[in-house]
Image (cartoon, rainbow, N blue to C red):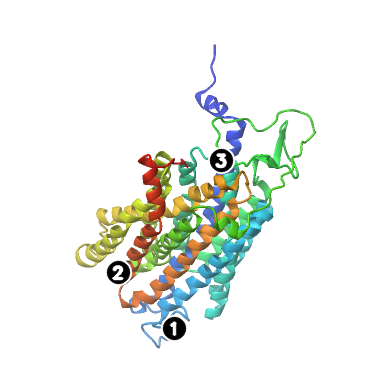
Amino acid sequence: MRSLAPGIKLITSFSRDSWYRFFILLLTFVFYTTYHLSRKPISIVKSQLHRNCSNVIHPADRNITDNDTWCDWAPFDQNNYRNLFGVLDNCFLVAYAIGMFFSGIFGERLPLRYYLSSGMILSGIFTALFGLGFYWQIHSLWYYCLVQALNGLVQTTGWPAVVACVGNWFGKGKRGFIMGVWNSHTSVGNILGSLIAGVYVSSAWGLSFIVPGIIIAVAGVICFLFLVESKSHFRLEGNLLLYACGLVEQEPLLRNSSSNEEIFSTNTSTAVETVEDHTEAISFCGALRIPGVVEFSLCLLFAKLVSYTFLYWLPLYIANVAHFDPKEAGDLSTLFDVGGIVGGILAGLISDYSGGRATTCCAMLIIAAPMVSRTVLFFLYFFTQTLGKMQTSVSTRCMLLWCGALVNGPYALITTAVSADLGTHECLRGNSRALSTVTAIIDGTGSIGAAVGPLLAGLISPTGWNNVFYMLIAADVLACLLLSRLVYKEVRGWCGYTTRLRG
């Protein structure tokens, strides 16, 4: 008797529910990848906007009056260019931090599909407008600051929406691992953004923004066409997916599940049963009263300060210290993001196994602090003293990978699994309309650190890059201290003093 091919057996072994979950996980992964893909180009283009023009060949048909700044892009051709870069970063990050606190409130009350797709399309427009400044020969700092600020506001639509969508489809059982893998979209987006921007940065840096802008706008259209924000929003009738308007689960969708139940009816009946949910969306103050929200929010403030300082300044640091050209510096900086993928998955696995989200974050932050200083020492020694530009050591590459894993691991865990846990905390008594607000509060507080970090880096870097890294080490230590109460509580639970709730 002939048997089915192994691949077909594998495909048919998964339930219809599992396939839809995988589809939503893949869609939201792609969507937030494009968000980060569109944020990354500014860090790559910085080293092109202000260069060492004395090493650049003069065009034969151009009269050069200033040998040091003729190839720079005004207004970033002055000695205060680092401060201007810091201002540019903060226009995006401050707008993002402010908007994030309101984004979650809107996300709880608006259809996620419309909210997310409109945000992605608008983000694509503003990202492209920054790049069009190259072709329109715009040299006004106010133009670039305005575009960055507007882009920061619309980018706040992304994170609360995708976390709420994934939370609606997945239970708590393996949330740390699933969201750890899923959260690699942050690093994947940074890597793709670096590579795409690097292709055009030396020839026409405007395309470094326009191409990512087009990509995220196209993803927004796909989101509008295909995203199903909750498994309660449709039924399966034959081969057609029909929306069940107003259909809401009686129980919160983020519940523990020991079995993979079939949730799609194959009944050919056209009747659709509607269930009303009278629970109100949680208020901002109500979300703050959930145990652990304040501690993890403040911890993320410092963790994100470190991560975003690397995100915005690492390529320029490599270019200045190792004397790489902008493309090479951008390519090497992607190793930090590759390490972030591993760190996010590792943090999720460890916290799932141990049940200690806070302890996992604290342990990684403690190890990350000395690793940050080791990374800068490796760069300063190997590049400037021993190896030279083209002989990047294996040790230095490994240090970047390891540093990326330790810095981004806690950041990834807090913004995904921890946010989902707190958004479905037992004190909510089954209210499933808190996840987006809790996620926005945690990520919004973290975004304050994301705004402060690059700004401080711009102000401190003229005094020496070592001082920037000392600031990052201090931020890691403070992040650990803010989790000390929760770590103590988890350790007591492991020792049998209190009942420890897993997940």
Q: Which residue is rendered at x = 64% and y = 56% of the image?
A: 107
Disc 1: CA contacts within 10 A as few (<14), some (14-19) or many (>=20): few
Q: Nearer the viewer, residue 174 or 69?
A: 174
Q: Which residue is rendered at x = 30% and y = 74% of the image?
A: 464
Q: Image quadrant for the N terminus?
A: top right
Q: Secondary structure at mark 1?
A: loop
Using the image, tell me which numbered label, if any, was put on residue 383: none
N-term-proximal mark, 2 vs 3:
3
Q: Residue most toward the left?
A: 386
Kindly indicate whether the residue at mark 1 contacts the one at mark 2 (C-beta within 8 angstroms). no
Q: CA distance from mark 1 to mark 3?
A: 61 Å
Q: Which amino acid type is marked by label 3? A: Phe
Q: Quadrant of residue 159?
A: bottom right
Instruction: Say if residue 159 shows up in the picture.
Output: no
Q: Which residue is mark 2?
A: 321
Q: Going by the image, does 410 lie left or right of 277?
A: left
Residue 288, x across and y down, in percent: 55, 58
Q: CA distance from mark 2 to mark 1?
A: 30 Å
Q: Going by the image, does 285 lie left or right of 414?
A: right
Q: Nearer the viewer, residue 3 or 224?
A: 224
Q: Going by the image, does 327 lie left or right of 394?
A: right
Q: Which amino acid type is marked by label 2? A: Val
Q: Which residue is mark 3?
A: 170
Q: Which residue is mark 1?
A: 62
Q: Quadrant of residue 408?
A: bottom left
Kindly indicate whether the residue at mark 3 contacts the one at mark 1 (C-beta within 8 angstroms). no
N-term-proximal mark, 2 vs 1:
1
Q: CA distance from mark 2 to mark 3?
A: 45 Å
N-term-proximal mark, 1 vs 3:
1
Kindly indicate whether the residue at mark 3 contacts the one at mark 2 (C-beta within 8 angstroms). no
Instruction: Say if residue 208 shows up in the picture.
Output: yes
Residue 50, x across and y down, in percent: 41, 76
